[in-house]
Image (tube, rainbow, N blue to C red):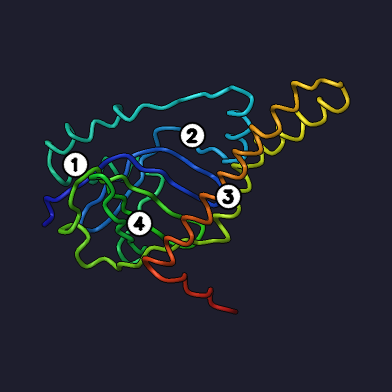
Amino acid sequence: MVDLVLWGDAQRVRGLNLQPGLFVLRPGYVAFLPTQPERNLAASMALVGAGFVRVEGDAARYDLKGLWLKGPEAFDEAVAGWAVQRQTREHVELVLGEEIRGQRALVVRSDADNQLICQLRGADPAALIEGWMLGKPRFDAPQMKKVMGVITFIPALFAVICGLVAYLGDDKMAYLGVPFWGVLVVFGWGGYFYAKRRHEKNHGPDPEPASH
């Protein structure tokens, strides 16, 4: 059991902040190793809208495969030094996602605003997650609405700009941008409501948050 390990791509989500990296799952802990800086979703969408995207980081620098060959103790010690987040089974809830086209995700949830989304890519984590607290998938509508608001803000803004340019500048061609960007907003929110209905059909509605 102590010789079991699984690692792969992961995304750390803290509110509206995202950070790509790697997850390491061991029988006693799950760790997150960053490969890029943490970014705010709103700022990232603004950069994408402006046509500026910067990619940093390198997952290869960790050399987890080579490190594992040195033995579990050396591996655990190095991971503890690299990790910006390391949690034990007593402090998190695991949610194993449905398999879609051979892909599966494992969500490590410490609370509603802090999650680690791990891409399993066909690997079976059953032996590693034995004894961990397992939860059922949640849609988290309030958080998803915040995310969708950020994602659809840029196309909605561009639709307004196109309309103003067409109206104030008497540029009829600019009107074509209004339905184009507007359709992106409609598709975004349509996807949100479709995903919400599908989740409730498969898993039932999310439990109401506890009142204090």
* Residue at screen point 58% across, 79% down: 211
Q: In this view, does 92 lie to the left or right of 163?
A: left
Determine whether 167 is above or below 197 in the image. above
What label sits on residue 29 in the rendered view? Answer: none
Q: Name the residue under label 4.
A: 87
- Label 1: few (<14), some (14–19) or many (≥20) C-alpha neighbours in 10 Å: few
How far apart marks 2 and 4 lie (CA) works out to: 20 Å
Tag count in the figure?
A: 4
Within the image, what quadrant is residue 2 found in? bottom left
* Residue at screen point 30% across, 67% down: 134
What label sits on residue 189 in the rendered view? Answer: 3
Question: Dots 1 and 2: beta carbons under 8 Å?
Answer: no
Give percent across and percent down for residue 195: 46, 55
Of pointers 1 and 4, the one earlier in the residue sequence: 1
Of pointers 1 and 3, the one earlier in the residue sequence: 1
Q: Mark 1 points at which residue?
A: 74
Dot 1 falls on a residue whose secondary structure is helix
Of pointers 2 and 4, the one earlier in the residue sequence: 2
Dot 3 falls on a residue whose secondary structure is helix
In this rendered view, identify the residue nearer to me: 2 or 202: 202
Of pointers 3 and 2, the one earlier in the residue sequence: 2
In this rendered view, identify the residue nearer to me: 100 or 38: 100
Q: What residue type is labelled 2?
A: Pro
Between label 1 and label 2, give the one nearer the viewer: 2
Q: In this view, does 126 lie to the left or right of 166?
A: left
How far apart marks 3 and 4 lie (CA) works out to: 34 Å
How far apart marks 1 and 4 lie (CA) works out to: 18 Å
Give percent across and percent down for residue 210: 53, 77
